Structures are given as structure tokens and as C-alpha cells.
Image (cartoon, rainbow, N blue to C red):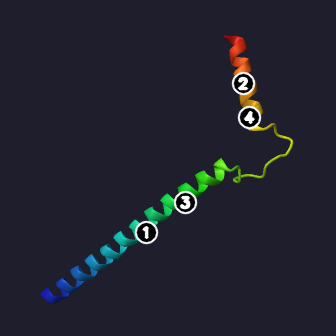
Amino acid sequence: MRSNLIATLESSFSHADRLEAEAKRSFALIDRLESAILAKALRGELVPQDPNDEPASVLLARIRSQHTAAS
């Protein structure tokens, strides 16, 4: 009976170790995924771009001038 309990405990600890290792790998993949998504977002690659949209530089200049005019 005691050896059966020991075998069950060893199996449980082994399973817990495998789960811990898998969790660590998953967190590392999540970090890489977050970095990749951020990089794509900064390059404008997350959604199709509309060539008719005004460039961000023009939009920012317009916002600055409106802010200055309002002050």
C-alpha cells in the first residue's frame, strides 16, 4: 500500500514538473508574440492600409496647429 502511495506521489510530482516547464515555455512564447504584434503595429502591418488615409505626419501637424490656435 505504501509503495503505491509513493508511486502515485512521484507520478504527481513528475506531472507537476512537466506542467511547470510547459507554463514557462508558454510565457516565453507570449512575450515573443507581444513583441511581434507591437512591431507589426508600429510598421502599420496589423490591418490593411487605405492609401486615401492622410499620413500620420500630416494629421499630427494639423492637431498641433489646431492646439496652438486654440491656446
Q: Quadrant of residue 10?
A: bottom left
Say whether disc 1 or disc 4 marks the residue closer to the N-terminus.
1
Question: Which of the labelled discs sits on residue 63, or is there none?
Answer: 2
Q: Quadrant of residue 57?
A: top right
Q: For marks 2 and 3, give the CA distance.
A: 33 Å
* Foreground: disc 3 or disc 4: 4
- For the point 71% across and 53% down, the residue is 45
For this rendering, which residue is in front, 61 or 23? 61
- For the point 22% across and 79% down, the residue is 9
> Which residue does the numbered mark 3 point to in the structure image?
33
Question: Which of the labelled discs sits on residue 25, or is there none?
Answer: 1
Q: Amino acid at mark 2?
A: Ile
Image position, residue 63 (x, y; %)? 72, 24
Viewer can see residue 1: no
* Foreground: disc 2 or disc 3: 2
Say whether disc 2 or disc 1 marks the residue closer to the N-terminus.
1
Q: Amino acid at mark 4?
A: Ser
Q: Amino acid at mark 3?
A: Leu
**Relative side of 21 to 64, left or right:** left
Q: Mark 4: give few (<14), some (14-19) or many (20+) Cα within 10 Å.
A: few
